[in-house]
Amino acid sequence: FGFANSLIGLIGFAVVITIGVGVLAGATYKKWFWVGLQLGTIFGVGFVHWLFYNSLYNIGALCPYCMVVWAVTIPIFWYTLLYNLREKNIKTPDKLRGVVGFMQRHHIDILVVWFLVLIGLILERFWYYWSSLI
């Protein structure tokens, strides 16, 4: 984008931390605010997956700082989504209520599978390196 990607993270995480502190202090936010946060987290999770792909398949190297950002951004997106669905900030059709209920009941399972897929892709991509350690 013509500037350091870390600037996006600094701004995005500052916003998320501020919102979290506000919630812990008892602040309430309007529906439009939560929808805006959801849009921001969608951008964030899409961006980190784009960076993940580029790290694995174009650059061919992993950055520890980047991996920490990936590991934090995904749960931020996921739990913001679950909150917004539960509080009906995002309306869901009646057909999808079962899916939303499943997501709410199995939130940790879905998150673990998500991370296992990413770890599996990392292991597969760098298998030549891992196998040389044995």
Image: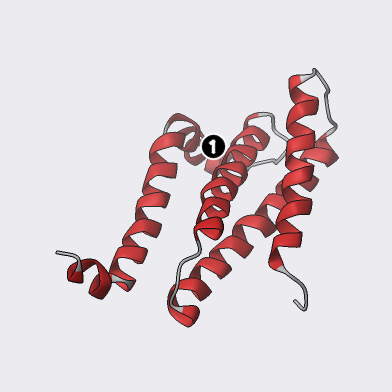
Q: What element carries label 1?
A: helix
- Residue that appears at 43% across and 77% down: 60
Which part of the image, by quadrant, shows the N terminus? bottom right
Identified by mark 1, the residue type is: Arg
Please, which colouring scheme is shown? secondary structure
> Splitting the image into 4 quarters, where does residue 81 fall?
top right
Q: Is residue 125 above or below residue 64?
A: below
- Residue that appears at 40% across and 58% down: 118
Residue 56 in sight = yes
Residue 39 in sight = no
Q: In this view, does 131 lie above or below 24?
A: below
Decide which of 64, 53 is in the foreground and name it: 64
Q: In this view, does 59 lie to the left or right of 36?
A: left
Q: Where is residue 47 in the image (x, y as percent from the top left)?
A: 63, 64
- Residue that appears at 56% across and 46% down: 72
Decide which of 70, 91 is in the foreground and name it: 70
Decide which of 3, 71 is in the foreground and name it: 3
Decide which of 82, 64 is in the foreground and name it: 64
- Residue that appears at 29% across and 69% down: 124
Q: Position of residue 106 (x, y in %)?
A: 42, 34
> Splitting the image into 4 quarters, where does residue 29 fall?
top right
| Number of dots carrying numbers | 1
Q: Is residue 98 above or below residue 55?
A: above
Which residue is tagged 1?
97
Q: What crowding class fits label 1: few (fewer than 14 Cα within 10 Å), some (14-19), or many (20 or more)?
A: few
